C-alpha cells in the first residue's frame, strides 16, 4: 500500500506537487527503458515527436506502470477511488539536444474539467539538475495564468506555451532517482531545462489520472479504467493491451494520438512537430 501520508497530502495541497514517491525498483525502471529503446530500434520514429503520446498502448511494460498499484494508491489519495487513465506522454531528453520545457500549466490547454485530476511523472532514468529535471513553482496552482504561444525551437511543448516572469528564486527542482515519481496538480507552473549530461533523461508521464467526473471539453479522449467504477461514462473506454508493438495496437495509438492533436492545437493554425 502506498497511500499518501497526511504530510505528503499537505505538501500536494499547499505546494501543488509532492515528491519523491517510491513506485518502481531500479530494475523495473531499467526494464521499461529497455522496452522503449527496443521500440525505437524496431519502429524508428514511431514514438518520437507527436508519436510520443500513448506509448503504453503498444508497450506492456509501460501499461503495467500505468496500472501499478503503488501509483494508483497515491493517486487515489488525491482524486478518490474511481480513477481513469486519460493518456500518457514520454518526455525524453537526449544528450546533446536542445530540448527544454517552458514554464506552463497543464490545465491551460488539455481540456479536462473540473481539475479533479493529477499527473504522475515517473522517472525511468535518474532526473536531476544536470540532465534537466522538472522545476516547480510552489503555490502557483491557485489560479490559471496567461501563456504566450511561442512555437519556439527546442521547446518540447506543442505550442511553446510559456508563462513569463517566473520568480526563479522560488522555483524548486524535482530531483528523482529512476523508479521514483512526482505527482503534480493540473495548475502548478512547471518547466525544465536542457540535458547537459552524457545519458538520456526519460520521464514517463501519465497525463493524466482523472476522476470519473472529469469531462474533456475540447475534443475526445478515450480512457482506461484504472480503479473503481465509472458511474458517469463520459468517455469511450479502451482495454489494456498485452502485446508488444502489435499492428492493431499501433493503429489504436495513432487514432488516439490524432484525437489528442486536435485537442492540443484547438484554435490555432500553427503547428510544431509535437
Ligand atoms: O518532462 C519534463 O521536463 C516536463 C514534463 C511536463 O511538463 C509535465 O509532465 O507536465
Image (spheres, helix red, strand yellow):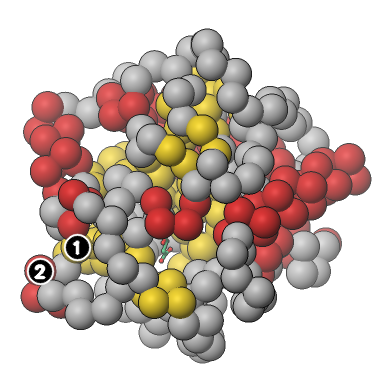
Residue at image location 47% in from the left, 57% down from the top: 109
Whole-angstrom CA distance, mark 2 to mark 1, is 6 Å
Q: Are marks 2 and 1 in contact (CB under 8 Å)?
A: yes
In what quadrant of the picture does the C terminus appear? Answer: bottom right
- Can I make out residue 68 in this image? no
Q: What residue is shown with label 1? A: 137
Badge 2 local density, few (<14 within 10 Å), some, or many (20+)? few
Task: State the SS at label 2.
Answer: helix
Camera-side residue: 25 or 97? 97
Q: Residue at x 43, y 72 (%)?
A: 161
Quadrant observed for ligand 1 in the rendered image: bottom left
31 is higher (above) or lower (below) than 176: above
Judge whether 200 appears above or below 122 on screen: below
Which residue is labeled 2 in the image?
Answer: 170
Q: Earlier in the sequence, mark 2 or mark 1?
A: 1
User: Is 78 displayed left or right of 113 in the figure?
Assistant: left
Q: Is residue 177 left or right of residue 214?
A: left
Q: Position of residue 66 (x, y in %)?
A: 54, 36
In-image side of 254 versus 225 (left or right): right
Amino acid at each position: 500500500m502506498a497511500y499518501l501520508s497526511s504530510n505528503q497530502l499537505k505538501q500536494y495541497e499547499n505546494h501543488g506537487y509532492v515528491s519523491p514517491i517510491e513506485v518502481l525498483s531500479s530494475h523495473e525502471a531499467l526494464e521499461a527503458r529497455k522496452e522503449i529503446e527496443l521500440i525505437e530500434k524496431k519502429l524508428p520514429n514511431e514514438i518520437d515527436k507527436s508519436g510520443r503520446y500513448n506509448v503504453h498502448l503498444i508497450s506492456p511494460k509501460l501499461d503495467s506502470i500505468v496500472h501499478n498499484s503503488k501509483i494508483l494508491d497515491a493517486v487515489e489519495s488525491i482524486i478518490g477511488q474511481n480513477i481513469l487513465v486519460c493518456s500518457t506522454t514520454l518526455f525524453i531528453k537526449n544528450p546533446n539536444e536542445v530540448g527544454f520545457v517552458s514554464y506552463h500549466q497543464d490545465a491551460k490547454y488539455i481540456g479536462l474539467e473540473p481539475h479533479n485530476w493529477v499527473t504522475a511523472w515517473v522517472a525511468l532514468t535518474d532526473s536531476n539538475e544536470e540532465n534537466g529535471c522538472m522545476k516547480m513553482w510552489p503555490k502557483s496552482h491557485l489560479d490559471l495564468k496567461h501563456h504566450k504561444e511561442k512555437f519556439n525551437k527546442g521547446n518540447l511543448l506543442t505550442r511553446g506555451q510559456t508563462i513569463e516572469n517566473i520568480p526563479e528564486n522560488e522555483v524548486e527542482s524535482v530531483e528523482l532517482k529512476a523508479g521514483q515519481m512526482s505527482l503534480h496538480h493540473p495548475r502548478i507552473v512547471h518547466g525544465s531545462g536542457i540535458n547537459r549530461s552524457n545519458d538520456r533523461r526519460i520521464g514517463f508521464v501519465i497525463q493524466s489520472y482523472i476522476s470519473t467526473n472529469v469531462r474533456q471539453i475540447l475534443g475526445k479522449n478515450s480512457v482506461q479504467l484504472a480503479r473503481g467504477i465509472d458511474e458517469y461514462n463520459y468517455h469511450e473506454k479502451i482495454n489494456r493491451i498485452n502485446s508488444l508493438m502489435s499492428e492493431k495496437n499501433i493503429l489504436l495509438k495513432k487514432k488516439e494520438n490524432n484525437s489528442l492533436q486536435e485537442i492540443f492545437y484547438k484554435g490555432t493554425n500553427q503547428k510544431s512537430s509535437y
